[in-house]
């Protein structure tokens, strides 16, 4: 007799993204009970064993794990489109840092809600954030029902601030939220401050999330993986955002320290910072994909990042090195590994959290689909799909987006308040 479950995603093209080998099922089904996945497999097998309170017909859908954005500044959604075409360091000095200085708790809350709305509608269920107001960010993420690793946006730290960050889980009271030590940059920060941050991360079991080897300028000034290591910041669980100019030896060092890379291909391309050695990264350590800030990218869409990651890597003359399946892995299980959450999310497996998305394949861009050739379907998902094709999003077993609409959020209110907060803070920063 079938067992009861809460949600059944039925009859779709299921891509599990599990390791060491992802599987596909067509038609496939996924059963969810409470917050967890309880079954995945062929539709005939799963539906013979499970009876759902809610059955979703996914016959024209691809079913994937929720996407993982491994590097973002969600609160900076209020700065979208205002940094122009300035190179990175001018952009930081003239626009980003003055804007950050003008931010406050309420504006950060509203900006993060705006970023969360954009991300979840594009299938992003988990993200690693870096922003100066982690408590306000945490409240915003909780209100949106997403999962996140939340780091401060530190250029200076006091011991009290670091201890408050370590004690954050008690204040946040949400198992989906994890604190981390954020390092905005190595340049312009006292070495003793960075060593103290590294010591706190080590002693309190916190991850470190930091920008690393993003520009040639900073690397030429000696701010490379070797300095990160010497300061004690390169350690198990460190999230290295960008790594554009990392050498093979540096990547070997990062792998020895059990760190991970958050690859941001579109932000790197827009800012003109270079093309990261993705194939070398992939061969050595966990790699996830990030959208970076809206001021560097203008959108939070990991389908864009998947496509750009492969296209830029092929520009390096390595056309046969990485395939669409590798890009999907970076956006799911790879990003989960970088964030240290791969035992909970990143793949569709019984016992993992039910963070799942369904992609609408009923569009001319996906025709012909060739469902009997899984590699071609994966290629469509990477090269043809966009975040706008996400129809259903489930986080922790709860439907948060259905038919492309955020069911649990007031979209109009988030957009209106985000618009007002952007105008206020841009004026305060002298950027109106």
Image (tube, rainbow, N blue to C red):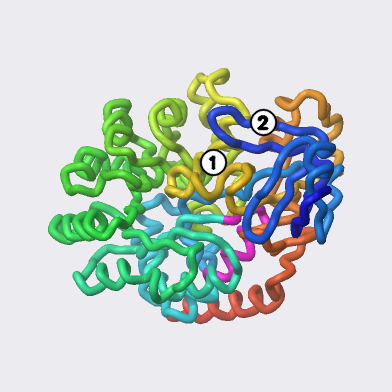
Is residue 205 found left or right of 42 in the rendered image?
left
Q: In front of the other: label 2 or label 1?
A: 2
C-alpha distance separating marks 2 and 1: 13 Å
Residue topped by disc 2: 23
Main SS type for the magenta part? Answer: helix
Image coordinates for residue 99, horizontal then vertical, percent = 41, 70
Is residue 284 found left or right of 20 in the rendered image?
left
Find out whether the residues at labels 2 and 1 contact each other: C-beta distance under 8 Å. Answer: no
Residue at the spot x=54%, y=79% of the render? 421
| 367 is higher (above) or lower (below) than 304 | above
Image coordinates for residue 383, horizontal then vertical, percent = 69, 35
Image coordinates for residue 114, horizontal then vertical, percent = 59, 69
Image coordinates for residue 69, horizontal then vertical, percent = 53, 51
| 2 is higher (above) or lower (below) than 21 | below
Tell me, yes or no, whether the highlighted magenta stretch contains residue 329.
no
Boundaries of the magenta span = 111-125
**Residue count near mark 2 (Cα–Cα under 10 Å), binned few <14, some 14–19, many ≥20:** some
Secondary structure, mark 1, is: helix
Residue at the spot x=45%, y=34% of the render? 275
Tell me, yes or no, whether the highlighted magenta stretch contains residue 115.
yes
Residue 333, numbered circle:
1
In front: 309, or 68?
Answer: 68
Is residue 383 found left or right of 87 in the rendered image?
right
In front: 213, or 169?
Answer: 169
């Amino acid at each position: 007799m079938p067992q009861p479950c809460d949600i059944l995603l039925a009859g779709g093209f299921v891509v599990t993204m599990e390791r060491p080998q992802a599987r596909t099922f067509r038609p496939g089904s996924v059963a969810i009970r409470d917050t967890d996945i309880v079954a995945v497999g062929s539709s005939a097998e799963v539906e013979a064993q499970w009876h759902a309170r809610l059955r979703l017909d996914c016959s024209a859908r691809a079913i994937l794990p929720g996407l993982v954005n491994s590097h973002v500044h969600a609160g900076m959604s209020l700065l979208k489109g205002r940094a122009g075409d300035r190179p990175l360091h001018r952009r930081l000095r003239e626009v980003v840092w003055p804007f950050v200085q003008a931010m406050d708790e309420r504006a950060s809350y509203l900006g993060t809600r705006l970023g969360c709305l954009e991300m979840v509608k594009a299938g992003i269920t988990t993200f690693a954030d870096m922003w100066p107001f982690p408590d306000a960010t945490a409240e915003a993420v909780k209100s949106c029902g997403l999962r996140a690793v939340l780091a401060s946006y530190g250029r200076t730290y006091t011991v009290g601030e670091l201890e408050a960050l370590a004690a954050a889980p008690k204040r946040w009271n949400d198992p989906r939220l994890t604190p981390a030590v954020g390092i905005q940059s190595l340049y312009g920060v006292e070495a003793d401050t960075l060593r103290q941050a590294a010591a706190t991360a080590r002693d309190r079991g916190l991850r470190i999330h930091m920008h690393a080897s993003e520009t040639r300028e900073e690397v030429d000034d000696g701010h490379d993986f070797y300095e990160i290591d010497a300061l004690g910041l390169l350690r198990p669980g460190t999230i290295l955002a960008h790594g554009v100019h990392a050498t093979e030896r540096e990547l070997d060092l990062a792998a020895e320290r059990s760190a991970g890379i958050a690859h941001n291909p579109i932000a790197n391309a827009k800012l003109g910072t270079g093309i990261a050695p993705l194939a070398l990264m992939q061969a050595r350590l966990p790699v996830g994909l990030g959208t970076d800030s809206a001021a560097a990218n203008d959108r939070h869409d990991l389908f864009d990042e998947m496509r750009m990651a492969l296209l830029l890597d092929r520009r390096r003359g390595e056309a046969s090195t990485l395939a669409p399946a590798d890009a999907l892995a970076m956006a799911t299980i790879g990003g989960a590994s970088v964030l240290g959450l791969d035992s909970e999310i990143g793949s569709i497996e019984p016992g993992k959290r039910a963070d799942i998305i369904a992609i609408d394949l009923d569009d001319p861009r996906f025709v012909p689909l060739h469902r009997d050739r899984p590699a071609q379907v994966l290629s469509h998902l990477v090269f043809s799909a966009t975040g706008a094709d996400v129809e259903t999003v489930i986080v922790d077993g709860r439907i948060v987006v259905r038919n492309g609409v955020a069911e649990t959020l007031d979209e109009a209110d988030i957009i209106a308040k985000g618009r007002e907060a952007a105008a206020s803070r841009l004026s305060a920063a002298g950027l109106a």
